[in-house]
């Protein structure tokens, strides 16, 4: 860090106030950030505010906080927290009438993490486990949850994109999603469209989102998580594997095994970088070990 930063006095620095946090939330919303991202970034900055215990923020304290994070979190979690604070610092530098101390802060550097070649087996949702979850939901008479899981997995969508699967979208067999400042079109297969049309007809849903609460509002992320955790318990599928984004990963792995086209898959998932898509295609450590054995290099 530059020498000028190490010379910054406390009087030149500034404390993180509730007003700063409110302005940061407004900034994130206007930037089109996803609700989950806004929530995560807000929690992180509030955590930093709490850690400071009323002390004015300085570059030295910020580096001390980073060191504190590396001691209690995994590198990926630490980098996620650093991303949140970097976004906050950028916002503060642009804030009208800001304290001059904000200009002294530079972007925090991320921890360098070697790219993983496999993921832990207890985090990979297998196709047979997915099918068991669907069967269990239907055996319980919960067609809504069964169809919801099928929709996420068959389309490879984020849980936040469920609200865009509407009655109107079913008629056109495509949904136009506008999230994170991006607009993309999701095609809906004939088989899924037929199932969902039958579902909305039986449940008298004539417009708007297909999956709604009793009050008619689109189901929330929390509602989906709770349903999936209860379903995991009932089906005895390992709970650590059962969460919405893992259905998206299953879609990615299944699509790639069939078509071997990572560029097309990146487009379908709405990824700007193929490097992000590669993460979705990680095999379990068990499969990776089997591939090493098949090389036949141990004589």
Image (tube, rainbow, N blue to C red):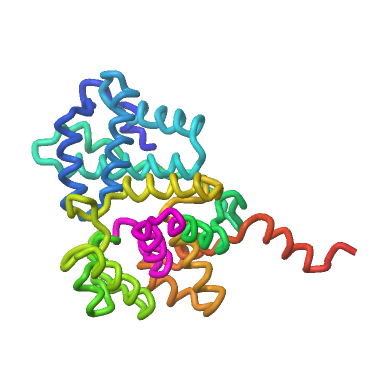
Is 253 rendered above or below residue 51? below
Q: Quadrant of residue 258?
A: bottom right
Query: Can you give x and y, in whole percent of width and height, for residue 221 in the image?
Result: 31, 49
Screen quadrant of the N terminus: top left
Q: Magenta region's main secondary structure?
A: helix
Q: Write the residue at 25% across / 52% down.
A: 33
Q: Quadrant of residue 126?
A: bottom right
Residue 146 among those drawn in magenta: yes
Q: Write the residue at 26% across / 49% down.
A: 35
Q: Nearer the viewer, residue 10 or 121?
A: 121
Query: Can you give x and y, in whole percent of width and height, for residue 60 in the image?
Result: 37, 27
- Apparent side of residue 113 relative to residue 206 in the rendered image (left or right): right
Q: Nearer the viewer, residue 153 or 263?
A: 153
Query: Can you give x and y, in whole percent of width and height, for residue 121 in the image?
Result: 62, 52
Report the number of numbered marks. 0
The answer to whether residue 182 is seen in the rendering is: no
**Residue lying furthest right in this view?**
299
- Apparent side of residue 280 relative to residue 173 in the rendered image (left or right): right
The answer to whether residue 282 is seen in the rendering is: yes
Q: Write the residue at 19% across / 73% down.
A: 168
Q: Nearer the viewer, residue 77 or 104?
A: 77
Query: Can you give x and y, in whole percent of width and height, for residue 217 in the image?
Result: 19, 53
Q: Nearer the viewer, residue 22 or 93?
A: 22
Q: Residues in magenta?
A: 137-161
**Residue lying furthest top in this view?**
54
Q: Write the residue at 32% across / 22% down.
A: 52
- Apparent side of residue 33 relative to residue 81 in the rendered image (left or right): left
Residue 295 among those drawn in magenta: no
Screen quadrant of the C terminus: bottom right
């Amino acid at each position: 860090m530059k020498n000028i930063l190490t010379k910054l006095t406390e009087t030149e620095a500034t404390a993180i106030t509730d007003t700063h946090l409110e302005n940061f939330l407004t900034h994130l919303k206007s930037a089109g950030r996803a609700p989950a991202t806004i929530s995560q970034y807000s929690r992180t900055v509030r955590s930093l505010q709490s850690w400071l215990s009323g002390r004015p923020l300085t570059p030295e304290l910020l580096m001390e906080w980073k060191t504190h994070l590396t001691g209690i979190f995994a590198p990926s979690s630490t980098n996620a927290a650093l991303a949140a604070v970097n976004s906050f610092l950028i916002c503060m530098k642009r804030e009208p009438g800001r304290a001059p101390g904000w200009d002294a802060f530079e972007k925090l550097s991320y921890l360098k993490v070697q790219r993983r070649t496999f993921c832990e087996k207890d985090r990979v949702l297998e196709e047979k486990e997915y099918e068991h979850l669907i069967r269990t939901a239907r055996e319980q008479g919960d067609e809504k949850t069964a169809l919801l899981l099928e929709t996420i997995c068959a389309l490879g969508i984020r849980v936040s994109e469920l609200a865009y699967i509407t009655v109107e979208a079913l008629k056109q067999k495509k949904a136009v999603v506008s999230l994170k400042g991006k607009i993309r079109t999701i095609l809906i297969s004939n088989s899924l469209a037929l199932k969902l049309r039958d579902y909305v007809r039986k449940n008298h849903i004539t417009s708007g989102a297909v999956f709604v609460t009793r009050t008619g509002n689109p189901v929330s992320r929390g509602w989906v998580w709770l349903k999936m955790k209860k379903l995991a318990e009932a089906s005895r599928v390992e709970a650590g594997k059962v969460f919405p984004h893992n259905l998206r990963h299953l879609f990615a792995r299944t699509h790639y095994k069939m078509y071997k086209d990572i560029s097309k898959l990146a487009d379908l998932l709405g990824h700007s970088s193929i490097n992000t898509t590669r993460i979705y295609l990680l095999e379990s450590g068990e499969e990776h070990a089997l591939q090493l054995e098949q090389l036949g290099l141990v004589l």
